[in-house]
Amino acid sequence: MSGSRTRGDIVIASGDLPARRQISRALKQAGYESREVSTAEAALEAAREDRPEVAVVEVCLREMCGYELCRELRDVHGDTLPIVLTSDSRTDRIDRVAGLLIGADDYIVRPFAPDEFVARVRALARRARQSAPLQPLIATQLTRRELEILNLMVDGLEQDTIAHRLFISPKTVSTHTQNVFRKLGVRNRAQAVSAAYQLEIVHATAAA
């Protein structure tokens, strides 16, 4: 099976090298690029540097279980990032239900048929992209001051430092920050920073 390259890539987090390579081969044949990592920490770093189209997470990771990594990825990217949990040992119904309740979009037991696995990943990626055309429009609704504050958050500045830099009160910064969260549809600073990169509005200055 072959296809054209997709717009995004897929992070595969698994300490099981054969399983990781099997998943990567199946995705590559379907036209996806993948980034293979063996630890949860590496997965979080990869996801923060460049938002993946989908994250495929092994449930049994050494430093942090896949359920916890799923929650961490949700904190960074919110509900817009499709997350697939996979395992060849945690295969009971209660394991699958727990994974879905914790926030995963799918739970795929190994061994699996490669074409079915790819079809399920592709369906998740397609649904996640359906809202993408609306995102640039949302970004244009940010005021100049909100863009300034967002970009200072991207630079890692805290609320008091932003207030000092812009000669406004911390309370005013907080108000603008909440407006940024609301307009971008995010819940916290990490998600706002991720959205800024995703929407390519980092260091943008034009605003209403």
Image (cartoon, rainbow, N blue to C red):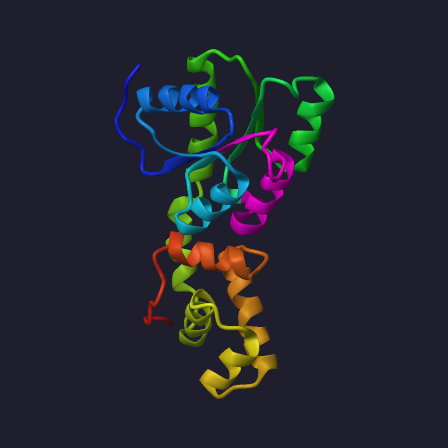
On the image, the x and y values in percent for residue 22 come to: 42, 19
In reply to whether residue 105 is colored magenta, the answer given is: no
| Residue toward you, 34 or 3 | 34
Residue, x 36% and y 20% (percent of image)? Answer: 25
| Residue toward you, 84 or 168 | 84
Residue, x 66% and y 24% (percent of image)? Answer: 96
**As drawn, which residue projects farthest toward the bottom?**
167
In reply to whether residue 59 is colored magenta, the answer given is: yes
**As drawn, which residue projects farthest toward the left?**
4
On the image, the x and y values in percent for residue 20 come to: 45, 25
Q: Which quadrant of the rendered structure holds the C terminus?
A: bottom left
| Residue toward you, 177 or 156 | 156
Number of dots carrying numbers: 0
Please provide the residue range marked out in magenta: 56-79
Residue, x 44% and y 33% (percent of image)? Answer: 125
**As drawn, which residue projects farthest toward the right?**
94
Residue, x 51% and y 48% (percent of image)? Answer: 77
Q: Indicate left or right for 34 with 75 as reference.
A: left
| Residue toward you, 116 or 63 | 63
Q: Which quadrant of the rendered structure holds the N terminus?
A: top left
On the image, the x and y values in percent for residue 107 come to: 59, 25
Q: Indicate left or right for 147 with 110 as reference.
A: left
Q: Quadrant of residue 131?
A: top left
On the image, the x and y values in percent for residue 144 come to: 40, 75
